[in-house]
Amino acid sequence: MLTHTGTQTIETERLILRRFEYSDCGSVFANWASDEEVQKMYSEPVYSTPEAVKGLLDKYISAYEKEDCYRWAVIERKSGQCIGQIAYFLVDSKNHFAEIEYCIGQQFQCRGFATEAAKAVIDFGFRKMNLHKVQICTKTINAPSKRVIEKCGLTYEGTLRDYFYMDGKYVGRLYFSILRDEYENREVKYD
């Protein structure tokens, strides 16, 4: 049975994953929400002003009232800036699975931050939420995201062909997952 805890703070070596706060508005805008390339890969709109980002934060912060809301601001310890976000955006309480989505600002990509955050959220899902399965999907054209998923030990399940229409062409959606017993018995530990 799923245990809903809501979004709790998770600390890793280089990151603090916590609830969004209005004080994050400036770094959310500067680091990722205004970046067309990041938002395109994340399938989200580009936010052209800090005021628009405040509207996004209104949505995120008000959602914390629900016990099944799991969305974290990814805070780099060193700078204190919000460099991205990660969430269980789809939680299926009946079937005990959840799907992760994430984005990291371009200047912070390819430095292991997405992997570090994803591993922490996967661990949270199995240990705190009692999930049976965690899944992550990515676009076929998003090689860096695919590497993150593989580093987290997820298994490729399949591709939904021509799932997204982007820049005048169709792009597939790759599905990956990890089951509780696979997580508990994995060869490479990340806790």
Image: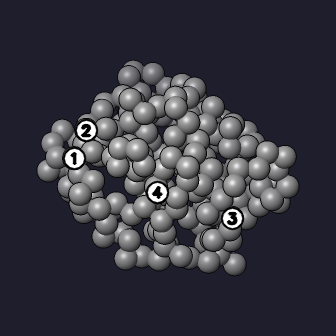
| Mark 4 neighbour class, 10 Å CA radius: few under 14, some 14 to 19, many 20 or more | many
Give the CA distance from mark 2 to mark 4. Answer: 18 Å
Give the CA distance from mark 3 to mark 2. Answer: 33 Å
Give the CA distance from mark 4 to mark 3. Answer: 17 Å
At mark 1, the secondary structure is: helix
Report the residue at 55% width, 29% height from top: 144
- Quarter of the image with the C terminus is bottom right
Rendering colour mode: one colour
Q: Are marks 2 and 1 in contact (CB under 8 Å)?
A: yes
- Quarter of the image with the N terminus is bottom right
Query: Which numbered disc, 4 or 3, marks the residue that appears first in the sequence?
Result: 4
Identify the residue position indicated by label 3 in the image: 126
Identify the residue position indicated by label 4 in the image: 17
Q: Amino acid at mark 1?
A: Gly
| Mark 1 neighbour class, 10 Å CA radius: few under 14, some 14 to 19, many 20 or more | some
Give the CA distance from mark 3 to mark 1. Answer: 33 Å
Farthest-out residue, front: 78
Compared to 101, does 162 lie above or below? above
- Residue 106: x and y in percent read 39, 30
| Mark 3 neighbour class, 10 Å CA radius: few under 14, some 14 to 19, many 20 or more | many
Query: Which numbered disc, 3 or 2, marks the residue that appears first in the sequence?
Result: 2
Q: Are marks 4 and 3 in contact (CB under 8 Å)?
A: no
- Residue 78: x and y in percent read 40, 44
Q: Amino acid at mark 4?
A: Leu
Residue 124 visible, this angle: yes
Identify the residue position indicated by label 2 in the image: 30
At mark 2, the secondary structure is: helix
Q: Amino acid at mark 3?
A: Phe
Q: Nearer the viewer, mark 3 or mark 1?
A: 1
Identify the residue position indicated by label 1 in the image: 26
